[in-house]
Amino acid sequence: MDKIEKNQKNLSEPIFGSPQMREPAPSEYIPKYKTPAEIAYQIVKDETFPQTQPRLNLATFVTTYMDDYGTKLMNEAVGINYIDETEYPRVAVMCGRCINMVANMWNSPEEAEWKTGAVGIGSSEACMLGGVAAWLRWRERRKAQGKPYDKPNLVMSSAYQVVWEKFCQLWQIEMRTVPITRDHITLNIDEAISMCDENTICIVPIAGVTWTGLNDDIEALDKALDRYNEITGHDIPIHVDAASGGFILPFLFPKKKWDFRLKWVYSISTSGHKYGLVYPGLGWVVWKDKKYLPDQMSFSVNYLGASIAQVGLNFSRPAAQILAQYYNFLHLGFEGYKEIHSNSMTIAEYCHQQIGKMPCFRNYSQTLENPLFIWSLDPEYEKTAKWTLFDLQDKLMQSGWMVPAYTMPKDIEDMVVMRVVVRQGMSRDMANMLLEDIQNAVEELEKLAYPTPSRIEAQTKGKVYTH
């Protein structure tokens, strides 16, 4: 076959008539021969086909919908490395503008032209940076006092996000957790204060708890900590993990004091790719003032063509998300964010109310503080039920929904709950479809003649999953 005939054959060969479609996808070694782009694309695309569609994934907090212009902007910036400020100086400027806007959204008192903050790949890196700053400040203070600095600790509720466990393990910091109980469904402030001592680097309250959707009472914590610091002479600050709440509270509850208006709040982290409405991954951390960001956290390099000072655990990172965040701020403005989050909250409240009316369920809390909520089986109903919430999760997956069932943190781990996270992209019609699918799934489960494997396992272990 000559070259012309070979090229003609490649042009006319249908994708699903190609030899590559008859073979399993490579899993161990790079293929020896090339695969035409359209066929390689189809193989990768088909690999994702059976997964839950992103907008039906009610387990994730991460943004699954952006408008066409935001998506276009990100696609056009996919090849830009944020850290290369020499070639892309305007990206650095837009990043600084975003930090200013986020800081002012949280009522920063800093008067500098550029507020003190940093961009991260998700709120996990932002949390790490806030924690590292608190640790370094504590260590330098202990050194200056001539005191030991080998036993730092951190205090927060047991409903923490896993990044804090990683942080404490990596930096060898004792993690002191205040149990979430049926009586204290958010941070027990008195118990948190009782866990503090001269080695406490900070207390970490949460605005938008991953497990429950609730907020810790940060204003009350600030007052209690102020009394404690005055009595003891300690200087324990607060870092607020506002991964979700950082973009909800300013728009829906602007009068609520939880941010830099409070005396001991020195730093706040949030996730731009959650209710900041940007595709992943993007996080922000802001300090109340430059003096709270240790100099040791700023690293300078000059091998990219100019001297660059960088704060972060990562170095190279995509610029696309930064541009998308700035685009959202420009396009939506305060009112646009408020409208979107108000809609999400309204739809979440509607789902919360309707699920609470179903005899087999019991809502975890009476009111919502963020557009997400959890519920469990009603204790009386559960006594005779032949199924668990894990079975309901499986049923909903058959309809394309991902609604997670999981056990609660230590001390209430016998409680199994389900969670719905409402984000931009969830409409009232979609909510009605979800509720109808839940009702249909429950009706099918109630027809079971015998207990499901998950129910048998629960009974065998002697666990009674109740609220």
Image (cartoon, rainbow, N blue to C red):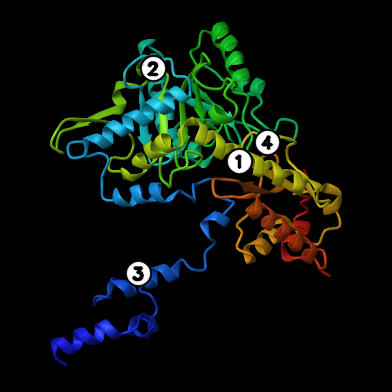
Compute the Cα span from label 2 to label 4: 32 Å
Q: Nearer the viewer, residue 231 or 44?
A: 44
Location of the N terminus by quadrant is: bottom left
Residue, x 66% and y 31% (percent of image)? Answer: 186
Q: Is residue 118 left or right of residue 345?
A: left
Instruction: Indicate which disc, 2 or 4, sits on the residue closer to the N terminus.
Output: 2
**Badge nearest the viewer, 2 or 4:** 4
Q: Mark 2 points at which residue?
A: 289
Q: How far apart are marks 3 and 4 (CA)?
A: 43 Å
Distance Cα–Cα, label 1 vs label 3: 37 Å
For label 4, the residue is 368
The residue that disc 1 covers is 343
Q: In which quarter of the image is the C terminus?
A: top right
Going by the numbered disc 2, the residue's amino acid type is: Asp
Could you say which is closer to the camera, residue 450 or residue 278?
A: 278
Residue type at the position of mark 3: Tyr
Q: In 3D space, how far apart are the residues under numbered discs 4 and 1 (Cα atoms)?
A: 13 Å
Label 1 vs 3, first from the N-terminus: 3
Task: Return the disc, 2 or 3, that comes first in the chain's sequence.
Answer: 3
Q: Is mark 2 on a helix, strand or loop?
A: loop
Q: Using the image, tell me which numbered label, if any, was put on residue 59.
A: none
Q: Which of marks 4 and 1 is nearer the N terminus?
A: 1
Q: Give the x, y percent position of residue 30.
A: 28, 71
> Quick one: label 4, few (<14), some, or many (20+) residues within 10 Å?
some
Query: What amino acid does circle 1 point to?
Result: Asn
Sequence-wise, which precedes: disc 3 or disc 4?
A: 3
Q: Nearer the viewer, mark 1 or mark 3?
A: 1
Q: Mark 3 points at which residue?
A: 41
Q: Is mark 1 on a helix, strand or loop?
A: helix
For disc 3, the neighbor class at 10 Å (few under 14, some 14 to 19, many from 20) is: few
